[in-house]
Image: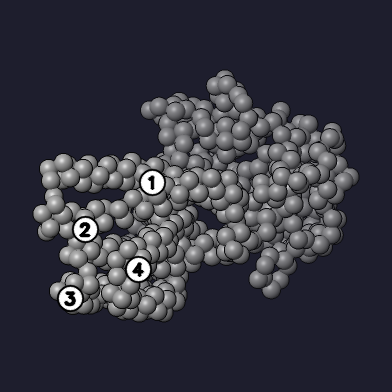
Amino acid sequence: MNSLRHIIPFLKKSKNKYFLGILILIIIDALQLITPRVIGYLTDDLLTGHATVNKLFIYILIILGIAGGVAIGRFFWRILIIGSSRKMEAWLREQLFIHLETLPTSFFNTHKTGDLMALATNDINSVRMAFGIGIVMVTDAIFLTAMTLFIMITNLNLKLTLLAVLPMPIIAISVTLLGFRIRRRFKKVQEAFGRLTDKTQETFSGIRIVKSFVQEDSELENFRFFNEDNYKVNMSLIRVWSVMFPLVSFITSLSLIVALTFGSQFVIDGTMTLGEFVAFITYLGKLAWPMMAIGWLINMMQRGFVSLGRINEILDVEPAYDEDRAHLDVTYEAPDSIETTNFSIRFKNVSYTYPGANFPALDDVSFEIETGQTLAIVGRTGAGKTTITNLLLRLYDDYEGSIELGNTSLRKYPVSQIRQLIGFVPQDNFLFSRSVYKNILFSGVESDKNKVIEFSELAQLHNEVESFSDGYDTMLGERGVNLSGGQKQRLSIARALIKNPPILVFDDALSAVDTKTEDRLLDGLKSQTAEKTTIIIAHRLSTVRHADHIIVIDDGKIAESGDHDELLKFGGIYADMHNKQMLEERIREEA
């Protein structure tokens, strides 16, 4: 029951369909047990000479009627049981997707995409099989076996029944022992598939790098390693599984040999009629399926519960924020909404160390920006600049110190509303495999084509989009592969601006844009940022020279602060960066 904890809501909702499907399946099992008895009566009538045309016609009608009823019943139990398992598959995949969206950023730092893809495909498929055909096998194994044995004992021959089923407990013992091995080995199979999926996804996502460094052969060797590992663990599982079915078939055959040996003697002695013996052999054949089903069942249930355990491990991870639990807990009451016109931002003695890191990314950082002001953050690579945006967006929340929005702690507001207030342009400029138009409107704002064009022009992107074969309907490849670095950055800027947020954050958003385009873009942004709180992180100092205030981050601390002219006069890190960039620009111009 503990393993079922995350799917109990679905099982409760679908219990009536499962119950009706199982009931129909039991009725079908009962109907199928009438046919052997009819064949037995027919055999005795033929043997004794009591068979007539009318009797034969009645026997045929009974058998056809049973076959028709079984066919109709099978249709309905498949719709009810197998259909419910398919719905469970879709429901569980949706629950997993929703839950993954609520998890902290740190979770994705330690869980690979391939493993999560394996969970959403192979593992959920195994759960679906366990709660679909697995339920059918459980029902058949229990009720068909019980009803068949009851008829064989009460209506045919008790002694012969006991002799025939004597070898069958060996099946239960064997499949139980093999089941433990299957469970362990199947977990290794799923883990190996996750590693293989992750390697494949990583290679094709970085295919341009692989080709540019001529590493196709090296990547193929790496793939072969994971592929071979996946093959070996699957073969390890198959070797155990392959023992089960021949064993079940062999033991079933032993039962048949026992029945033929002793049953034929009973017929000769007159203890049984030939019709009863034929019916007995037919019933024994009916027992073959539930015996085989036990083998399938053990394998399928072990796979299903191993996969469910892996899924449970993910679903047990706590969401990043209390409000994210609203996806799973309808009783959650969200904190007060943000109702303020004061969008000033204050960092007070903020320190943060990433999980697993030995040194803090930020160490006792304090600064403030008033509404309508622009703060620039500069510094060397790895100094801690991006960490400031991560904390402001509450991608990480376990920092020391205080971050305030409008004189109120950031933690007192719903995280979703915090992010709605911020137009963010990240370093990596992730784009989706959708049209240019839909990528610009990704934030969910409702806007028309004219607005999209307006903000594209503001981002200095419109003319280039118009040159595409399908304009704004041009479909982008994975991660926007068919755009240049500068086009990706400008599309991301348009995507952030069209939200019309009160806070704008640009994290090195113009690094791939040439200086002339940058000047035009910055001039256009002045009208947008006049009344907005703006943070600009940049390596190129030409991007930040007009900021109201500039801070220089070095080794997680604020090393310098002031405006452009003050920092140049100070002659520190900022001045050194400025002089180097000016020299690089002169060299480029001369070249």
Q: Which residue is mark 4?
A: 153
In depth, the one of 413 and 543 nearer the eye is 413
Number of numbered discs visible in the structure rendering: 4
Q: Is residue 312 shown left or right of residue 26?
A: right
Reading the chain from its start, which is encountered first: label 4 or label 1? 1
Q: In terms of secondary structure, where does tag 2 sit?
A: helix
Residue positioned 73% across, 38% down in the render: 421
Question: Which residue position holds label 2?
Answer: 40
What amino acid type is highlighted by mark number 2? Gly
Query: How many C-alpha atoms fall within 10 Å of the one at disc 4: few (<14), some, or many (≥20)?
Result: some
Structural distance between the alpha carbons of marks 4 and 2:
15 Å
- Disc 3 marks which residue? 269
Camera-nearest label, 3 or 2: 3
Q: CA distance from mark 1 to mark 2?
A: 30 Å
Mark pair 4, 1: CA separation:
31 Å
**Vertical placement of 250 versus 524: above or below?**
below
Residue sitting nearer the eye, 551 or 567? 551
Instruction: Tell me the SS state at disc 4.
Output: helix
